[in-house]
Amino acid sequence: MAAILLLLLIIAFSNFIIPRGANRFRGIILAVFQLVAFVFFYQKLAVTNAGEVITESYRWIPELGLNLQFQLDGVSIIFALLVTGIGVLVFLYAQAYMKPYGHLQRFFFFLFLFSFAMLGLVLSANMIQLFIFWELTSFLSFFLITYFNEKEEARAAAFRSLFITAFGGLSLLAGILLIGNIAGSYVISDWVASAAAIKAHSHYLPGLLLILLGVFTKSAQFPFHFWLPGAMQAPTPVSSYLHSATMVKAGVFLLMRLSPVMGNTPEWNYIISLVGVTTMLIGGYFALTQRDLKGVLAYTTISALGILVLMLGIDTKLSVKSAIVFLLVHAFYKATLFMVAGFIDKKTGTRDLTKLGGLARQMPVTMVITMLALLSMAGLPPMLGFIGKELIYEAKVQLPGIASIILVVGVLANAFMVAVSVFLGYKLFFGKQGDLPKKPDEKGVLYLLGPAVLVLLSLIYGLFPGIINRMVEVALQVVVPKALDIHLKLWHGFNQVLLLSVFTVLIGSALAFFVIKKPKLLGKWSNLNSSVFSFSFTKAFSNMISGFVGFSERNTARIQHGSHRYYILTIFVVTSLMLWYQLYDTRGWTLATNITLQPFYISILVAISIAAAVFTMFSKSRLSSIIAMGVVGYGLSLIFLYYSAVDLAITQILAETLILVMFVLILQKLPVFAKLSSRATKIRDMIIALSFGGVMTTLALKAINVEFNHPISDFFLENSYTKAYGENVVNVILVDFRALDTMGEVTVLTIAALGVFVLLKTRSKKI
Amino acid sequence: MNSVILKIASRYVRLILFSAAIFALLRGHNLPGGGFIGGLLAGLAVVYKGFAYTFREARQSMRLKPEFLIASGLSIVLLSMIPGILNGKNLMHGIWYKIPLGEAMEIKIGTPFIFDIGVFLTVIGVTVIFLLVLNRE
């Protein structure tokens, strides 16, 4: 498995080596490698169908308990086959579709890497590793959606999708860490083993909520669904892949993975079912009023994802089984419909449903394929979609008590699906044809190859569901251990479920009839929608983002006001307050008491320094203030010298000299005082200065009396010559014992120099 | 400032300051001095020239520009950390090489000294940049 993943990764990057001249068959080359991966997994199907799990493990960071672990079981093989299988068809389709556009190396690189990331995600046996692939898919989908980056809408949609899925990803990480902490491991099989402990732990609910946030954002569940319709700005091959086998299915996959760990609790059932049922309903409702062909399909995806999430939330054996089957159903018909939509868009030049129509004569093959896919979407025999929908109904019928409301809503949502299918089928091929920008034809085998294969599969599996029976059964055992044996059948006989199906079709057809016959009413309905549901998630999202940006701008302006004087004031006030508090807190210490005035020349030196400092405050001339400050500094260095700190004294003298020179240089450029500080300001500054000076003095006086057991200076004195071959202890500390500090200081100096350089350079240019 | 005395004196004063800087750097490990002090002294020498002539001329007369001094100084600091690892010790572990000179004498060159040279160069560069930039017309 790891070898296949590595191969795909290398192939993705080798896109930049394959020359541009090869663009004519770039997609076909990549499709071949997808096919290699598909065949690899198809061969493993026999192993997993026998109920075995293939695992592989490679050392990564064993110190952290992290290894590259891969796991191929009943669930991951279904996803792996979908990703690689639909991948083959998508790459073939993309070869034809992307021909007129530029940057193909980049596009195919991202698309291939995307397929790699999704495959890595479903094969991960370790949650941290899964998270990395999860984020990689979010990140890559950003680049795919923003492929037409000259379009403002594409950029905005890509940003929305990245923001929402990355937000969900972070929340997922937090959830993984919480649960991993309970289980003491990040390996999924360990999680399954300690499922009981996880469910009993008090962190179960927060962990579940965080993980679900990740799932719901990724799988476009209400209220995060709005990024998905925006994502149709991507080129159609991407939409087709994104909606059917990858990206949005990652959330569904994670639910299946975690169902044996966290499932079957009231929290799991209620939260997930509620979100799923809401998403299912609004997806179906809004699908019907879209005018863009891809928009309709995007909303039906939302509805289908709602169904999948709902079924996994109900978490009975039957519902999980229906989810697995419906996953296949949806992947097949949605990939088909998107590819067909892209084909129609290419050939007619528009995706506007008010213009499209009457294509039956010009595109007969397309019509047959589309009709079959729509049958599957509507859940009608003989397609696989029928089996999927029957199972879903059966699972819902079995629900006890008040949960039967789910059944009602489910029938309604399915009726919408039927209506959408009938409406699309009629409108595209038989409805009135509007002004099409291009005269449609049906040339291009590559366009129709993928849809034809998928529809055929959908039909074969629908007629002979026994073929996939074992695969679904094994997957079911992974998600819900000890599953009952339920066989897939096309014909269940007359029962309640079949009646529900008939009822659904009737409502759906009536709805579709109404929409087709009264197109004006559809327009009114659409307008009504936009006025009743005036709350636009997209708008709310962009308002939220711009509001947040404004908030941080205001806050930044408040904190980073740019007035140097108030920065220093803030630092002094805060520091002195904290130090005073600390002094008060540890008031048991005694101050140094043995203060003498001997020898007298040092006392005189101190007195001169104090006098100079006082002079600095009252001097009216800047130059004399600075010179007086220099006196304080030189006085200090003499004191250092007296206490035989020669290095310190030399450094102090040199630094003092340089500072004086700098001040003199700056002073030439400053204007004369415009006005002096007011009396109140002076008093305020004096209080702050006294407070700060006072606290530092007290601290120094106290510090003398603090006795540590082993002063560190002894260590330096002992080892300076023996270990570091230096007699000058100060220098040895600087360059050897504490060399890291010195390196930091030198780096800071450099940064300061760069800062001054840039600041003054730009300033002088402006003036 | 256009003082002939300053200009003529600057030649000798700079020589003294540079010598003092090198002296401080070399003896730093055993006696007061070191890279930081040496760097400041050398920086003062450039400042002196700046006052005697102009800061523009002072910069132009520098063979190694201050930006280069900073960059090479930091690089030397970083490089001096590596021999420690190569000898199987920790990063920055001091390694000393002894070069014998005759019977009783030997010169010891260690990574801390190389580190000090890096500090020396960086400090010169930083000092000169500060002063040059502050004094630009």
Image (spheres, grey):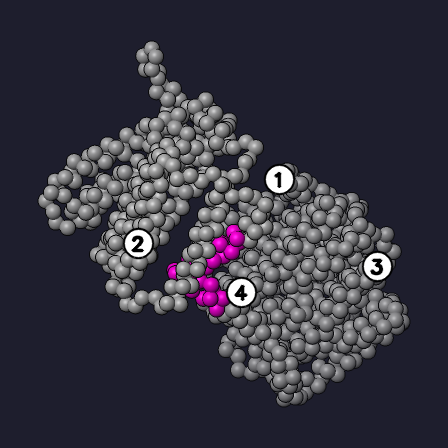
Q: Residues within 10 Å of mark 1 (few under 14, many from 20)?
A: few
Q: Chain of mark 2?
A: A
Tell me which residue sits at (52%, 32%) in the image.
Answer: A711
Q: In the image, is A64 to the left or to the right of A309?
A: left
- Nearer-the-camera pick, B123 or A256: B123
Work out whether residue A470 can be spotted: no
Residue B73 image point, x, y percent: 35, 38
Q: Which residue is mark 1?
A: A61
Answer with mark 1 or mark 3, whichever residue precedes in sequence: 1
Q: Which residue is mark 4?
A: A159
Tell me where the magenta segment starts and ends, as one range.
Answer: A553-580
Mark 1 to mark 4: distance in Å? 33 Å
Answer with mark 2 or mark 1, whichever residue precedes in sequence: 1
Mark 2 to mark 1: distance in Å? 64 Å
Q: Amino acid at mark 3?
A: Lys
- Occupied quadrant, residue A493: bottom right
Q: Residues within 10 Å of mark 2 (few under 14, many from 20)?
A: some
Check residue A387 for magenta coloring: no
Answer with mark 3 or mark 2, whichever residue precedes in sequence: 3
Tell me which residue sits at (27%, 41%) in the image.
Answer: B43
Q: Chain of mark 1?
A: A
Residue A140 image point, x, y percent: 55, 57
Mark 1 to mark 3: distance in Å? 38 Å
Q: Which residue is mark 2?
A: A615
Q: Quadrant where the C terminus of chain A lies? A: bottom left
Q: Which residue is mark 3?
A: A317
Q: Is residue A388 above or below residue A643?
A: below
Secondary structure under the numbered disc 2 in the rendered image: helix
Q: Amino acid at mark 1?
A: Ile
